[in-house]
Amino acid sequence: MTDHEKEILDKIKQSTEKTPVPESLAPDQIMKMLEEHNRTQASGHIPKKHGFSRGHRMRGGLIAAALVLVVGIGAHIRQQNLSSDSATSSTKGSSSIGTSSGKLASSDTLETATDYDEVYTYLQSYQDELDSSSVTGSTDGGIVMYSTETADNGARTDSSSSSSDSSTASARAVDTSFSDTNIRTEGVGEADIVKTDGSYLYTLKANSQEISIVDIRSDQMKVVSGISLNENFQASEFYLSDQKLFVLGNMQNTQVDSDSKTLYRGSCTRIQTYDLTDINNPKSIGTVDQSGYYRTSRFKDGYLYVFSDYYIYDTITKKDYPSYVPLVGDNLLKQSDIYLPTNHAADQYLIVSSVSASSPDKAADQKAVMSENGEVYVSENNIYIYEYANSSILADNLAAKNQTILRKLSYNKGKLSGSAQGKVKGYLNDSFSIDEYDNTLRLVTTVTHNAGSSSQSNAVYVLDADLKTIGKIEDLAKNEQVYSARFLGNTGYFVTYEQTDPLFSVDFSDPENPKILGKLKIPGFSEYLHFYSDNLLLGIGMDTDENGITNGVKISMFDISDPSDVKEVSKYTLDQYYYSDVFSDYRAALVDPEKNLIGFPLSGSANQYVILSYDKDQGFQVQMQEEVNGNSYLGTRGVYANEKFYVINGNAIEAYRVPSCKTSVSFVKRDKKKGMIPMLTTVITMPCTTENSIPCVAARSAFLTSPAPRHSAIRAFMPTPKPIAIALIKF
């Protein structure tokens, strides 16, 4: 259990001493459910569908429910404890939020506060509405015991914008000697618990307070140095760029100003930067703190963009600004940096700050949006904060509840600016269900039809740059829900599931008239989709029989050369394994089509890491399946560097030698505008041999006809030499 979760449960315990709550939401009961979830995940036994409950969502839902309960109870307590100054200046019982000018009346624009009084009025109005809404703690009062979103905490952290196809960088043909973190948006970096520069491995230890630096230039791995963090600093993940390490996480402390007033209350998010010029002696060169718990981050064009959730738990006083105004660094956010949307009120902020890699000791810019546990999707140029209104205590009807609220902020070289807000019906499965392309935003949602029932369907929406709906398809796949999605150019793919897996393909070439091109129904479902080439789509999920009983983790390869006729051309089931970290965190996957590597961890009777390759004739082939050493709740990662493959879990690193064939390949790029051109390419591959392996042979040439792939290379290794274990280090 994280410190954040412990804090929430402690607040529940304190609050429930005086306030009655439902037995199902009692702290001890929530604790039992969390512990049971942990035991379930550790054992690898996942209830079957309808029993496949997607355990990562259960955990998030329990905490979300706990959080909502805290907010509701806290509102009641706060109302009683407000000072006379606060009480007399509030807009108690008022249903309007904003100033007399009415500038916040529009739901299409994203307006900033005029002054702190306006922020106070906004927060207090929300609390007054909570107090008058007769919140009892039942699900009928708006408390939901499940989460409809996967946390981007890096969870299923973004798509490319108008200028490029929206696929992950790891799906592109990139000639590098080492792997990087699997990312959502090409060109937008993401933090992780393991990084490499080809010479060293950087790994966050299980205690979350140390980062080890391991020399991997020889077969004999060696720890050369490490970074010990402040005892109150719990690191979540980090970046590696230009001989700098940027560590992000939560700082459990308070800061006090000269007047002895507490500024940072409880935890805050910390960005700690280290200079790695002397690899044996890393040096701290900058620290930036901001209010709230660390949510996620992105890195682009030399700037970090850091997101945190700031909950207003305690009594607020009108003139005590730090009681309700967030901080970045030592400064309160300016009124003009706080957005107060009106189509959905809240009493918490989602804060985003930017920090230059060249000046890591200060924030370049900062903004805060009133949000209710919103998730984050970052395209190449914009930030989208989205939240499902069903979690709102104040949503008193199904139509008001059953919608996703969207807020849009643009970003460029550290500068942030709010631009628009909008809404669509239903909820998003994760950040892969939302995609920006050619100045439009495409979304796939699941819509609940009747309160308290399982009746639901799915919908496709297209929004313009102002977040206004310009195209839609509704009532798709009734009584099913979206499990995964991916977009490539003008085509989108998404998977729904009840007992069989329909994979839909959607044509977005006319944004105002999106069309379903086809659907493929097969047993099971894919939790994660990844483009393996322009014509191939990889799916990682679960295999099920016709009754919905799970058989194990399934790997599928779909032929998408004709989006109207998608085919599953190969599948492989890893039986006795019922979960993978990839289901909740796409960064756990290593997918490299150029090296023909598909790697990810497995959970079952034992924790293992598997590497597969794919051949159009032979299908999937397991190249390695080994038990994982180490024991860390942070997760398992696989990376390659200089023909070696490393599996990292906590304080253990395993090294494998990966035989390779050196090739000379002529790559062909497709004209994005013309799209379809015939061409001839030749691939020349030098045979390679390794100890105890059969030589691999590659195809010599092939004729590529219209349409040509964006990056094409003909290669068919037969067979692929398997990795050989060479070293294990524990520290």
Image: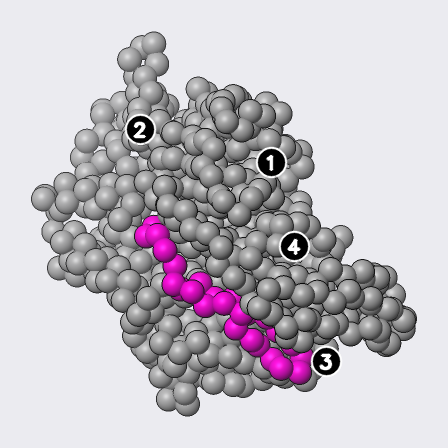
Check residue 241 in the rendering and tell me which mark sits there, or answer none.
Answer: 1
Q: For the view shown, which residue lies furthest in the left direction? A: 17
Residue 167 x/y as whole percent: 65, 60
- Residue 421 appears left or right of 59: right
Residue 166 x/y as whole percent: 67, 59
Q: Amino acid at mark 2?
A: Glu
Q: Secondary structure at mark 1?
A: strand
Check residue 681 in the rendering and tell me which mark sits there, or answer none.
Answer: none
Q: Amino acid at mark 1?
A: Ser
Check residue 169 in the rendering and tell me which mark sits there, or answer none.
Answer: 4
Please name the residue that numbered disc 3 is placed on: 562
Point out the stretch of residues depicted in magenta: 608-634
For marks 4 and 1, give the one nearer the viewer: 1
Main SS of the magenta part reads strand
Q: CA distance from mark 4 to mark 1?
A: 17 Å
Q: CA distance from mark 2 to mark 4?
A: 36 Å
Q: Secondary structure at mark 2?
A: loop
Please name the residue that numbered disc 2 is placed on: 231
Residue 194 x/y as whole percent: 48, 46
Q: CA distance from mark 3 to mark 1?
A: 40 Å
- Residue 615 appears left or right of 344: right
